[in-house]
Image (cartoon, helix red, strand yellow):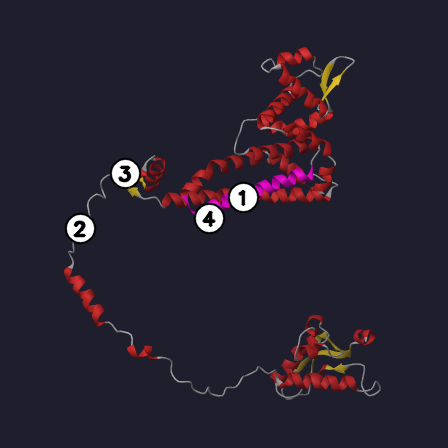
Amino acid sequence: MLAWGLSQHLDVLDALRGLLSGGHAAARLRVWVFLELTAQPQGRLLRDDLNQIFYSLKPEALDAVLKRLRELTLLVWDSTSQDYFLSSLALQVQALLAPLTRASSEDDEMASLLAQVAGAQALGLSDASQIRHLHAQLARLYDEFADAIASGSEARLREAQPRFERALKLVGRAGEALTALIRSEHGDARLEREARALGNGQARLLSMASQFTRALQQADRQRVTLGSTGVTSSDVRQWLQSYSSLPTLLGDSLSIGVQPIFVSGHELVDVAEGEFERDRPNPRRSEGLPPPSQAAAGEVEVLSMPVELDELIAQLTRLGALPEGETANSLPLQEVVLGGRFSQAAYRMQLLPLLGDHQSRTLKGQTGDLARLPWQASFLPAVERVDDPSVFALSLGALHPDISRESNE
């Protein structure tokens, strides 16, 4: 989409390339003359008007710039009326170069993008690419401020605080326009998706204000007050950072040799005695490795499944292999579940939902073998009493042949 959009404005790209080509001084001169021409309130300009506007330029330099502008179709010469006028292409190029006329600021990109989005929304000319670029800038600012908070450095937090406050102020001023853009109904699904993503990015940046405040408060609590003067460790660090020549602070402090004085002789004697009396490594350990010995025989224990699962698979396999005339269309749950202790019957009952389960069919082992059997279990919301010494009542239900699998086979 972006490449297609650029291909539709090749004339603008060619005009920018021709306007900025060459040396730095020549490119700056052409841009200055072009922006001065676009700022003139007259629709048409005579050559005398140009000479008055650019009186500080030499005629040769002005003629060279005007010639380049005419070659790029930014400035058109009307031979009939003997005057100049700006083309529609020049207005497009001026819209791209307009941010260069504003005062420099750290938040130029953020402010210009917000102005474009808010102005386009007010005029009903919202563009998804502008919203996506603004969302990307919000994400970059969020990551930058998140890194400053995660660092825990008071210097980084203090450095990022003014820019963070300016970013919040810009987002707050454009909040009404962004809210109207998100709530408005658009026929373009891409525009609506980018607008909602922009709203989420704006909310993330606004929610970071409390985190930023807590990080600054934590940095304030970590300050150490030096003496009764009120000077803190942060003040000392800031003074050291602004000091021009730190090595001169040492002065002659290192000109005198270090003279150690031991005032704890008894403690040194105790440490020395403990060092002599501590356990030493066995000197025989360095004689070499022990002789080889035969390893004892071992057994690998493999987890085995309960016997009831194997018996249930064998029973259902045997019933499924009978001819059609010898088996019923369905089997009551009593014939499959009952038998043995209550725990064994409950275990078989829990295995029945695996029959025909699509996810369990892909498993290896006995669980997958049970799921791949051509049976399906159905249960009813009722119970019935059964004649069994270990089970008093059993849910109503039956096992049915899996007709769908038979048809696929």
Left or right, residue 11 beside residue 245: right
Distance from label 4 to label 2 (Cα)? 44 Å
For badge 2, the amino acid type reads: Gln
Residue at 69% x, 70% y: name it: 359
Disc on the earlier residue, 4 or 3? 4
Q: Where residue 32 sits in the image (x, y, percent)?
A: 61, 22
Q: Which mark is residue 150?
A: 4
Residue at 22% x, 68% y: name it: 275
Disc on the earlier residue, 4 or 2? 4
Corner quadrant of residue 122: top right
Left or right, residue 285 beside residue 360: left
Distance from label 1 to label 4 (Cα)? 12 Å
For badge 1, the amino acid type reads: Tyr
Disc on the earlier residue, 1 or 4? 1
Distance from label 4 to label 3 (Cα)? 33 Å
Disc on the earlier residue, 1 or 3? 1
Corner quadrant of residue 187: top right
Q: Where residue 363 sits in the image (x, y, percent)?
A: 67, 74
What residue is pinned by disc 3?
Answer: 249
Q: Is residue 391 visible?
A: no
Under circle 4, the secondary element is helix
In magenta, the rendered stretch is 127-153
Residue at 80% x, 87% y: name it: 322
Name the image quarter holding the N terminus. Answer: top right
Under circle 2, the secondary element is loop
Q: Which mark is residue 37?
A: none
